[in-house]
Image: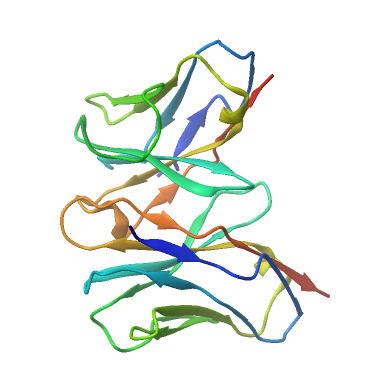
Amino acid sequence: AQTVTQSQPEMSVQEAETVTLSCTYDTSESDYYLFWYKQPPSRQMILVIRQEAYKQQNATENRFSVNFQKAAKSFSLKISDSQLGDAAMYFCAYVASGGYQKVTFGTGTKLQVIP
Amino acid sequence: KAGVTQTPRYLIKTRGQQVTLSCSPISGHRSVSWYQQTPGQGLQFLFEYFSETQRNKGNFPGRFSGRQFSNSRSEMNVSTLELGDSALYLCASSPEERPWLGQYFGPGTRLTVT
């Protein structure tokens, strides 16, 4: 069974600084997708970034970028120039491609941004 | 377009009762997935529907069931509620036949079982 592990329950970062959230996963599949979702307090979860396993290039979305290490099964999220609005729970997620696979989420990392 | 809506937003039920939660996806989206979110377990997949057919189901007891209507609206039902069913239930819709390419989440229904 696929598992997703986020070993940092909570993290904090100073405003304007850079922070990296860690995620590891376990799978026997070779083709899959990885995601980072953001859930602000009392607000809806939104997709931050998506990475396709067969693409070696790391995905980026403005201030958000990932470091995808397929062999190590590691998928970290880097947030640059942190803003107060980045404070949220961040969830790493995995799904195998092909067929109708369920999405597996990590337990989340709570990010605090300090003014 | 209006986002994913879930009703009710908050619900308090007693152990042993049953409950029905509703999810209206974004217009044009045919895939609806349900998740249970708890502090200890994180997000756990319940089931996914596409065009009224359940395509995948998570590891939940048979007390959890769902359905999807022809207009893509979905409902989930939990019978014989237990204290451990207290959670935030999230619904997510997708325009794609492969929902994992882009899921749009609703605000959730906070269920408290006493």
Q: Nearer the viewer, residue B74 or A107?
A: A107
Residue located farthest toward the right when viewing the structure as drawn: A115
Q: Residue at x 44, y 25 (%)?
A: B22
Left/right placement of residue B88 relative to residue B5 reads right
Q: Nearer the viewer, residue B47 or B62?
A: B62
Q: Quadrant of the N terminus of chain B?
A: top left
B16 above or below B37? above
Q: Nearer the viewer, residue B51 or B87?
A: B87
Q: Position of residue A60 (x, y in %)?
A: 43, 82
Q: Residue at x 42, y 31 (%)?
A: B23
The quarter of the picture where residue A20 lies is bottom right
Q: Residue at x 33, y 28 (%)?
A: B73
Left/right placement of residue A55 relative to residue A41 reads left
Q: Quadrant of the C terminus of chain B?
A: top right
Q: Position of residue A4 (x, y in %)?
A: 45, 64
Left/right placement of residue B87 relative to residue B19 reads right
Q: Position of residue A84 (x, y in %)?
A: 73, 70
Q: Position of residue A23 (x, y in %)?
A: 50, 73
Q: Residue at x 64, y 13 (%)?
A: B14
Q: How is the image coloured?
A: rainbow
Tag count in the figure? Answer: 0
Residue located farthest toward the top when viewing the structure as drawn: B17
Left/right placement of residue B41 relative to residue A95 reads right
A31 above or below B46? below
